[in-house]
């Protein structure tokens, strides 16, 4: 006598088929490979510890902690342990602002002075769209230490003068942490409550991220990895921990690999999580649409997210770096695949570990061929020479024999070759050679140079 499927078994079969279809081009994680890659990079970068979560479909298919939460205690890392994120915070700030726009409380293309009183008139003309896409023209800075008083966010912004802009709003993409401070303060002002409460009520609560917070005194009540820096050639806990409430919207969320996976799952599944609609699908579509072209390539910036295509995969991602910590969130929405990594050493986003997981699980196209390059000639060097500024940072370019010598905040590079969209520095054995993008104005005179995600405007 033939067997029949029960309703429950039919449901399980349907779910299994759906997950298989969604992840048809994705292999299952290899724990041994991930552990090997993690321990190698921890050792090479002197990072005490890291936690990893891998998402496939609508579930976490792998999570693990490696190394220690503190070199002083030796406590092991676990995937539910809190880390401070750095700039991956920006996707949460952007989500809150876009959500308020969808509620009709913010016009993304209106001057922020419509909502915030008392701003310098020039600053007040910037729009939320420009803030969230890094096209505001605000210079970049990221002081790690400052006031613990949450009112510092608004107090600091109200001291800005017109010279806080290094370029006209809307002119060029240039990564700006202060742009996200202002975006967070916009959300705070419109909502009538502190920024930390806005994020908790609009995102952490609906997503079930019960331990995630912006407040250090709340984070320290849960298991938390301590932030480290390299001191005297070895990792050391940063005492006291870095905190600056005036910059929270740009990079200060405390969260874990597992709790971040809840945001990622909702983001890749049209806002659905645990069978519920927790984020509007339109919010996700707006955030992951290209809003600014990143100079020097084919990549774009959405809202709080980098958008790129590499080896046949469309990536929606962001990295984070701050005193004591680093983080990486890479999402491949078409494959419903994501990697989340948090680590406890300044700037350590563990990119090689992320690459190893991606390479082992996704069917990737072959690496593209290198672009054609040519030696710089004297005319090109002369055209670029000058001083370019972004706030208190500067890039100084000058002829040096047959090379363009670049002094970038004390770091010296020599550029001798050029591709179609950028100049290429001499290899120094420390990763990829530095790229410098040259951007002329309508008259052909170099107006901006772009390096390390920031634009610098000619000062002379």
Image (cartoon, grey):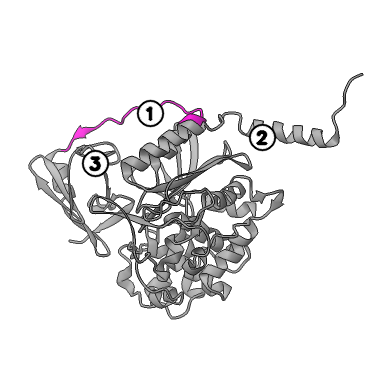
Q: CA distance from mark 2 to mark 3?
A: 44 Å
- Looking at the image, is mark 3 or mark 1 earlier in the sequence? 1
Q: Residue at x 62, y 61 (%)?
A: 205
Mark drawn on residue 368: 1
Crowdedness of circle 3 by 10 Å Cα count: few (<14), some, many (20+)? many
Percent across and percent down for residue 84 are: 44, 58
- Residue highlighted by disc 2: 19
Position of 257 relative to 432 (above/below): below
Q: Is residue 379 left or right of residue 451?
A: left
- Looking at the image, is mark 2 or mark 1 earlier in the sequence? 2
- Looking at the image, is mark 2 or mark 3 earlier in the sequence? 2
Closer to us: mark 2 or mark 1?
2
Crowdedness of circle 2 by 10 Å Cα count: few (<14), some, many (20+)? some
Q: Which residues are magenta?
A: 359-376
Note whether residue 279 is visible.
Answer: yes
Percent across and percent down for residue 221 are: 52, 65
Residue at the left extreme of this rendering: 401
Percent across and percent down for residue 416 are: 17, 38
Mark drawn on residue 423: 3
Q: Residue at x 85, y 36 (%)?
A: 7
Q: CA distance from mark 3 to mark 1?
A: 19 Å
User: Image quadrant of residue 374?
Assistant: top left
Q: Secondary structure at mark 3?
A: strand
Q: Is 211 or 48 nearer to us in this picture? A: 48
Q: Is residue 10 left or right of residue 308?
A: right
Q: Residue at x 46, y 64 (%)?
A: 249
Quadrant into which the N terminus falls = top right
On whether residue 414 falls in the magenta region, the answer is no
Q: Is 285 or 211 nearer to us in this picture? A: 211
């Amino acid at each position: 006598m033939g067997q029949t499927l029960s309703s429950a078994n039919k449901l399980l079969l349907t779910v299994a088929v759906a997950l298989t279809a969604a992840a048809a081009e994705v292999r299952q994680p290899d724990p041994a490979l991930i552990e090997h890659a993690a321990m190698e990079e921890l050792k090479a970068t002197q990072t005490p510890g890291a936690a990893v979560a891998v998402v496939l479909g609508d579930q976490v298919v792998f999570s693990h902690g490696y190394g220690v939460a503190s070199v002083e205690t030796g406590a092991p890392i676990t995937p539910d342990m809190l880390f401070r994120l750095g700039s991956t915070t920006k996707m949460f700030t952007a989500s809150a602002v876009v959500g308020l726009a969808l509620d009709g409380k913010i016009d993304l293309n209106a001057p922020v002075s419509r909502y915030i009183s008392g701003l310098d008139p020039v600053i007040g003309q910037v729009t939320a769209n420009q803030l969230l896409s890094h096209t505001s023209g605000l210079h970049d800075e990221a002081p790690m230490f400052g006031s613990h008083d949450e009112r510092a966010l608004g107090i600091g912004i109200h001291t800005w003068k017109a010279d806080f802009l290094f370029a006209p709003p809307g002119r060029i993409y240039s990564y700006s942490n202060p742009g996200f401070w202002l975006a967070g303060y916009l959300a705070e002002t419109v909502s009538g409550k502190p920024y930390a409460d806005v994020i908790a009520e609009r995102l952490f609560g609906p997503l079930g991220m019960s331990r995630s917070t912006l407040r250090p005194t709340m984070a320290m009540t849960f298991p938390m990895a301590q932030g480290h820096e390299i001191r005297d050639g070895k990792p050391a806990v940063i005492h006291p921990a870095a905190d600056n409430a005036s910059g929270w919207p740009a990079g200060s969320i405390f969260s874990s690999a597992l709790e971040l996976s809840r945001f990622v799952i909702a983001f890749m599944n049209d806002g659905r999580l645990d069978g519920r609609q927790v984020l509007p699908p339109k919010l996700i579509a707006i955030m992951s649409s290209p809003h600014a072209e990143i100079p020097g390539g084919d990549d774009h910036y959405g809202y709080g997210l980098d958008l790129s295509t590499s080896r046949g995969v469309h990536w929606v991602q962001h990295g984070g770096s701050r005193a004591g910590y680093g983080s990486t969130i890479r999402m491949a929405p078409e494959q419903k695949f994501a990697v989340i990594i948090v680590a406890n050493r300044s700037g350590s986003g563990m990119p090689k570990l992320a690459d190893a997981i991606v390479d082992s699980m996704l069917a990737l196209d072959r690496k593209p061929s290198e672009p054609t390059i040519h030696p710089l000639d004297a005319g090109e060097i002369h055209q670029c020479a000058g001083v370019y500024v972004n706030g208190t940072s500067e890039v100084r370019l000058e002829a040096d024999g047959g090379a363009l010598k670049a002094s970038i905040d004390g770091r010296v590079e020599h550029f001798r070759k050029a591709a179609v969209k950028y100049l290429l520095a001499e290899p120094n054995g420390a990763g990829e050679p530095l790229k410098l993008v040259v951007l002329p104005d309508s008259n052909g005179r170099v107006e901006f140079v772009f390096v390390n995600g920031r634009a610098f405007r000619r000062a002379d």
